[in-house]
Amino acid sequence: MTKYDYDLFVIGAGSGGVRAARLAAQLGKKVAVAEEDRPGGTCVLRGCVPKKFMVYASEVPEQIDYARGFGWDAQAGSFDWNAFRDRNQAELTRLSQIYSANLVKAGVEIVNAHAAFADAHTLVLTTKSGGQRRVTADTILIAVGGWPFLPQHCPGVAEHGLTSNDMFLLPELPKTMAIVGGGYIAVEFAGIMHGLGVDVTLLYRGQKILRGFDDEVRDHLSNEMTLRGVKIHTECDPVKLHLDEKGRTVVTLNTGGTATFDKVLYASGRKPKTEGLNLDALGIKPDVHGAVPVDPFSRTEVENVYAIGDVTNRANLTPVAIREAIAFVETVYKANPTAYDHENIPTAVFSQPQIGTVGLTEAEAVEKGIEFDVYTTRFKPMKTSFVGGNSRIFMKLIVERKSDVVIGVHMVGGDAGEIIQLAGIAVKAKLTKAQWDATCAVHPTAAEELVTLKDKRA
Ligand code: NDP
């Protein structure tokens, strides 16, 4: 035992913080974690998990259409938002309780309070009722995550714009909704709300949604979303929001004119949640994105203070935060300095249809000066051909010419999230196109196209 109250004090009981706290406690360290909300963090309480349940709920009408195409006498009936929302929240409560139970089982003390630095080893814990106490720790891990960001340039946003946090608790489903933004959250909620029967308009300031993704993926998803009925307006950005006499949100657009919606969701990015941590007390200056700067071992410029997860703005994904937590514990408590390798992280966007992607986009390969070949395919899945629809799957492999290694895999279509997990192994292992092709196809599947792509793009 050190001279401090704790060996490790973790700030934030989200995916990263919980994993680090549990692993350190299992090694016999005295550990506490401070959390203002319930344990679970963004992923469990207001992100990945409730979002995925909403995706499932919203896919039902399409499945019913398919059912009819396959001869079932199926009707969608009506959707009870209140019943779904309450069941979703109940499931989150169950999962949060499991997080708490696992922490307690590992011997971690959970402190329901806000933590702020007094100095490098001292935190001030403030409870909701205002009670304060000081604790000291040998090592402190910042794992506070991020929070939705609302643009400042648009009056009325703070008062009338919803964030993704609000989407899980809507008192009722709106009939019409504008979604501002063209990133992960915007396209995911566009699909969800459309599937639930809401008339959705996506307003994106750029020319093409999903900046940073492969251009062909961006185009394909945009076409597929439009085909399904989502209205996408690019180069379009609200400049003012106000309510009309019926309580609907009137959006004044940069393109001139106004449009009125029941609700407006702002999916305009997230910011590291460093406010209130009093990082000044340590001399830590957040970077231009508000993130806590760290070295490859997640150590800040203060020797005993580390940071992992979205607050460091490296790759803002739950599994990455968990891997960073594991690397932190290896480094600090197992004398095994481990820098998590952020290369080739597979990721899925739960848009409708889904995106799965790993490795370089074509633009990134060009930028790196790599010589490469491209293999693409667009095809109607057999299920869609059977019932008669126009939706197509898109797949793309980017292969380095000199080594034959597959350096990028991109897919838009059903189950892309599941498929990309396995493609991610092959890309991480730097397998060659010849090795992909030597793998026997699984027939009849969509995924088999990935091992049967023959024609290079000219
Ligand atoms: P993103 O960074 O993905 O997208 C933000 C969007 O908002 C961009 O289209 C951006 O436009 C636009 N935007 C930014 N600032 C403004 C502004 N001032 N006015 C108007 N539009 C603006 O953020 P998200 O909030 O969608 O997601 C945050 C992160 O959460 C993601 O990066 C991802 O790491 C994670 N996430 C992961 C999911 C998954 O794994 N499936 C699901 C959801 C979130 P521009 O492109 O022009 O900058």
Image (cartoon, rainbow, N blue to C red):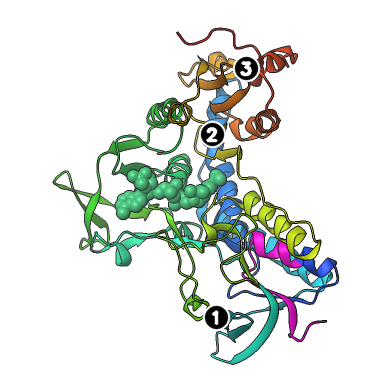
N-terminal of the two: label 3 or label 1?
A: 1
Task: State the residue at coordinates (28%, 44%).
Answer: 205
- Left-right relation of 341 to 410: right
Q: Quadrant of the C terminus?
A: top left
Gap in angstroms between the C-alphas marked 3 and 1: 51 Å
Q: How many marks?
A: 3
Question: What segment carries the magenta color?
Answer: 1-21
Does residue 18 show up magenta in the picture?
yes
Which residue is nearer to you in this view: 22 or 265? 22
423 in relation to 184, above or below: above
Label 3 CA crowd tier, 10 Å (few <14, some 14–19, many 20+): some
Q: Amino acid at mark 3?
A: Asp
Task: State the residue at coordinates (55%, 37%).
Answer: 59
Name the residue beneath numbered marker 1.
116
- Left-right relation of 360 to 28: left
Numbered disc in front, either 3 or 1: 3
Q: Quadrant of the N terminus?
A: bottom right
Name the element at disc 1.
strand
Q: Amino acid at mark 1?
A: Ala
Numbered disc in front, either 2 or 1: 1
Q: CB atoms at circles 2 and 3 under 8 Å apart?
A: no
Locate residue 71: give its quadrant.
Answer: top right
For residue 33, say whether it is visible. yes
Label 1 CA crowd tier, 10 Å (few <14, some 14–19, many 20+): many
Name the element at disc 2.
loop
Gap in angstroms between the C-alphas marked 2 and 3: 27 Å
Name the residue beneath numbered marker 3.
404
- Left-right relation of 23 to 450: right
